Amino acid sequence: MSDFEPQVVPLELGEQSYDITVAYNLKDNLSSFLQPWNKGQQWVVVTQQAIYDLYSQVIDHLKVEGFKVEAIIVPGDESAKNIQHAEQVWTKMVELGCDRSSILLAMGGGVVGDLGGFVASTYMRGIPFIQLPTTLLAMVDSAIGGKTAVNLPAGKNLVGAIYQPKAVFVDPSFLETLPRRNVISSLAEAVKYGFIRDLEIYEAFVNRFEALVGMKDQALLADIIAKSCNIKAQIVSNDQFEGGERKLLNFGHTIGHAFETIQEYGGLYHGEAVVYGMKCASYISHKKGLLNDDEFESAMQVLNRFDLPELGEVEPERVLEIVSHDKKNINGTLSFILIDGLGNGVINTGVTSEDIIDSLSVVS
């Protein structure tokens, strides 16, 4: 994919349909992509300080091109995703004179996208927003599909809404400034698609892991991003509100979210927690006979290539307590995502507390 060949992935949701546009250096000409929505109204760019320091020229360029736009800075880590920070953004928007015609542009990683989308979904009962993800994790997962949320002390993403953006613009050149740890964490959501749906993605991680982590092959990276976006778009189109198929996207997340909650969102990056969670889910899949020995060994070899910080001591009872509050727990029954062979995610309601506790052996 060259600078001049944007790849457009449609997400079909009737009147809520929108396009995901993938193109290198898209940010350098962002005004032309946003122009259809610019009617002279107040725009706000919700972003984090590190992104603003690197890319304030993107906002400056919008101003030069006639956009009435101001930046609102929020913390770049998971601590931003709470009601207090949402209130601060709402208040700043009132001060800027934002009304129902205003548009919010979320420029950052998954935290910024989740918080920005939640703010947009609730400000004056909902204003348009557009996603401009700057991390790989956001590009292949969190910026797509309309999930918005903030956290509570009891768990991650417990307050939020399904609120679709007007568009998602993916520029892989943002990734050139990311530290290696962020890239590795972000790749967790990409390899997830390999586990649940696409063996070609999985094989890329088996054979080209260092090329992906080092971002040494632009064509390979763009291909993985586009394939991931296609899978996410197809699944969301089929199941916008997570009544069935969309639950597959939570592979590795149920126990992973528990690890994040235990560390109070301050230790593991989200993708790192998901890798640990995928190890546990793969173990349970093997235990239940869904993965044979060779498949389980291959899965663990791939997941073990991710450099992860130490998980630390994990109390099984605390994990079970958090999992019991998981959003996929309906009427006391947990829909757990397993893999019935590599590349084939399935929803399983037969995962027991004993299964979860046993799976912790692969991350301890």
Image (cartoon, rainbow, N blue to C red):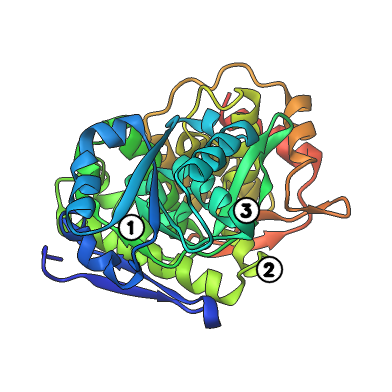
Q: Left of 313 or right of it: where is 184?
A: left
Give residue 203's mark.
1
The residue carrying mark 3 is: 122
Q: Which numbered dot is residue 244?
A: 2
Q: Position of residue 35 (x, y in %)?
A: 27, 68
Question: Which of marks 3 and 2 precedes in the sequence?
Answer: 3
Q: Residue at x 48, y 57 (%)?
A: 195
Report the residue that reaches farthest toward the right.
Answer: 331
Rate crowding at label 3 as few (under 14), some (14 to 19) or many (20 or more) other CA atoms within 10 Å. some
Looking at the rendered image, the disc whose residue lies closer to the viewer, 3 or 1, is 3
Q: Quadrant of residue 186?
A: top left
- C-alpha span from label 2 to label 1: 27 Å
Nearest to N terminus: mark 2 or mark 1: 1
**Disc 3 marks which amino acid?**
Thr
Asked whether residue 9 appears in the rendered view, the answer is: yes
User: In the structure shown, which secondary structural element does the residue marked by tag 3 occupy?
Assistant: helix
Element under label 1?
helix
